[in-house]
Amino acid sequence: MGASCCLCENFGWMLKLEVNMKKLALAAALSLAASTAFAGGVVEPVMTPAVVVAKTSSSAGGLVVPLLLLLVLAAAAASN
C-alpha cells in the first residue's frame, strides 16, 4: 500500500508539471504570433509621381498631310 501512495504523489507532481508546460507553450505561441504581427513596423506609403506628357504642336497645325495628299491627287489627275 505504501507504493500506491507514492504513485499518487508522483502523479500529482506530473499534473502540475503538465499544466505549467501547457501554460509555457501557450505563452510562447502568443509571443511568437505577436512578434510576427509587428515585425514589419509602420512604413510610410510610397506614392509614385504621375507622369505628365506635354504635347508638342507644330506651326502647320496638322495641314501638312492633307496638303501632301492634295498634291499627290493633283499630280495623278494632271498625268492623265
Image: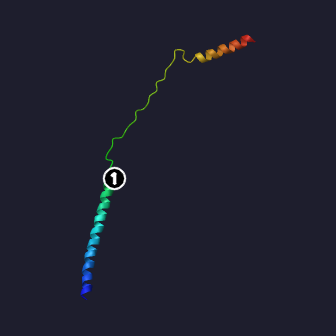
From the viewer's side, name the closer residue of 14 and 69. 14
Picture quadrant of residue 78? top right
Way the structure is coloured: rainbow
Relative to 55, 80 lies left or right: right
Q: Could you tell me how many numbered marks the image carries?
A: 1
Q: Secondary structure at mark 1?
A: helix
Which residue ends up furthest to the bottom in the rendered image? 1
- Residue 1 in picture, x, y percent from top left: 25, 89
Relative to 79, 32 lies left or right: left
Picture quadrant of residue 42? top left
Give the residue drawn at x 24%, y 83%. 6
As displayed, is residue 74 above or below residue 49? above
Dot 1 crowding, Cα within 10 Å, few <14, some 14–19, many 20+: few
Give the residue drawn at x 25%, y 76%. 13
Give the residue drawn at x 33%, y 43%. 43
What residue is disc 1 on? 37
Picture quadrant of residue 25? bottom left
Which residue ends up furthest to the right in the rendered image? 80
Image quadrant in which the C terminus is located: top right
- Residue 57 in picture, x, y percent from top left: 50, 19
Give the residue drawn at x 31%, y 64%. 26
Relative to 78, 3 lies left or right: left
Residue type at mark 1? Ala
Which residue ends up furthest to the top in the rendered image? 78
- Residue 17 in picture, x, y percent from top left: 27, 71
